[in-house]
Amino acid sequence: MCNILQVHWTISPKTPPQPWIACSGCKCLKPFRSSGKIRLNANGKRLDAWLVYRCVDCEKTWNRTLFERRTVHDFSPSTLEALQRSDPDWVRAQEFDLDGLKRKAERIDEPPDVTIRKETLQVASDWTMLEIELSAELPVNLRLDRLLAAELAISRSRLQALRDRRKLKAHPDHGEFLRYRPKDGMRIIFDLSEAADRRAIGEAACPERE
Ligand SMILES: [Zn+2]
């Protein structure tokens, strides 16, 4: 296609989910935030590991069990090393493990703050179609229309109008995609051939110039 501006956005949540846990300091349910630190206990060949959380109000700790009484041989050397030094990537995968958290807490807050890294893949000088590929490895708690409205500086009602006129499409398209979270691997396609502010929208979709 020669009439396209194609970009890639990598969307990463900033603040990990916060489970609500009975806090012994506050004497009520409170959100707890991850400290990013793993506590490891070795008993002979047996290992226990916890991710340490703290009450957002009083700093009391809650140790979230990651596993109990597993043998050292269950783990690869690289995983053992990651556990020992609270490797940030390994910890981050645990922090965003919503299924694991839901087994410990009935209520989980997911802060909607995200960072977005934008790349330009191809740009035709006379482009009229804007295609945005999304990567979102970790769950982000943000509706797609809010994300697009904020990043492209166009209103949510205009997004809906474009959608209604089939000037905004998604692949895969599961109906009301604008109301749901951005999905990893999703492609958003705008036909902006009739938009007078096409250049401004295109600039907002691309990385900021140095
Ligand atoms: Zn507390």
Image: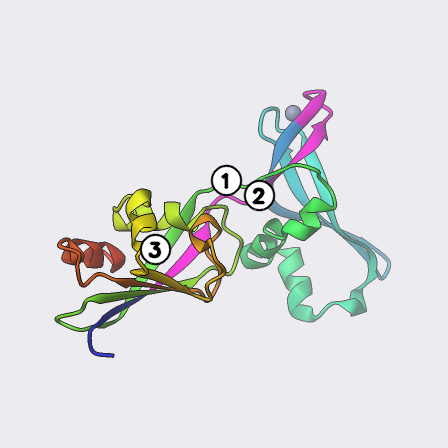
Q: Is residue 210 visible?
A: no
Taking the image as drawn, is residue 3 in sight?
yes
Mark 2 falls on what kind of element?
loop
Q: Relative to the observer, which residue lies in front, 43 or 4? A: 4
Q: Which mark is residue 163?
A: 3
Element at label 3: helix
Q: Residues within 10 Å of mark 3 (few under 14, many from 20)?
A: some
Image quarter for ligand 1 equals top right
**Disc 1 to disc 2: CB gap under 8 Å:** yes
The residue at the point 65 percent across, 63 percent down is: 81
Residue type at tag 2: Pro
Q: Quadrant of the N terminus?
A: bottom left
| Real-space Cα separation, disc 1 to disc 3, in angstroms | 27 Å
**Does 124 sit left or right of 141 as displayed?**
left
The kind of residue tagged 1 is Pro
Whether label 1 touches label 3, CB < 8 Å: no
User: What residue does disc 2 label?
Assistant: 17
Q: CA distance from mark 1 to mark 2?
A: 7 Å
Magenta segment boundaries in residue numbering: 8-29
From the top left corner, tell me how far across and down residue 9 is, in percent.
36, 61
The three-letter amino acid code for the residue at tag 3 is: Arg
In the rendered image, which residue does mark 1 sit on?
111
9 vs 70, nearest the viewer: 9
Identified at 34% across, 55% down, the residue is 163
Per the model, the C-alpha gap separating discs 2 and 3 is 31 Å
Tell me which corner region of the image, top left, top right, bottom left or bottom right, holds residue 192. Answer: bottom left
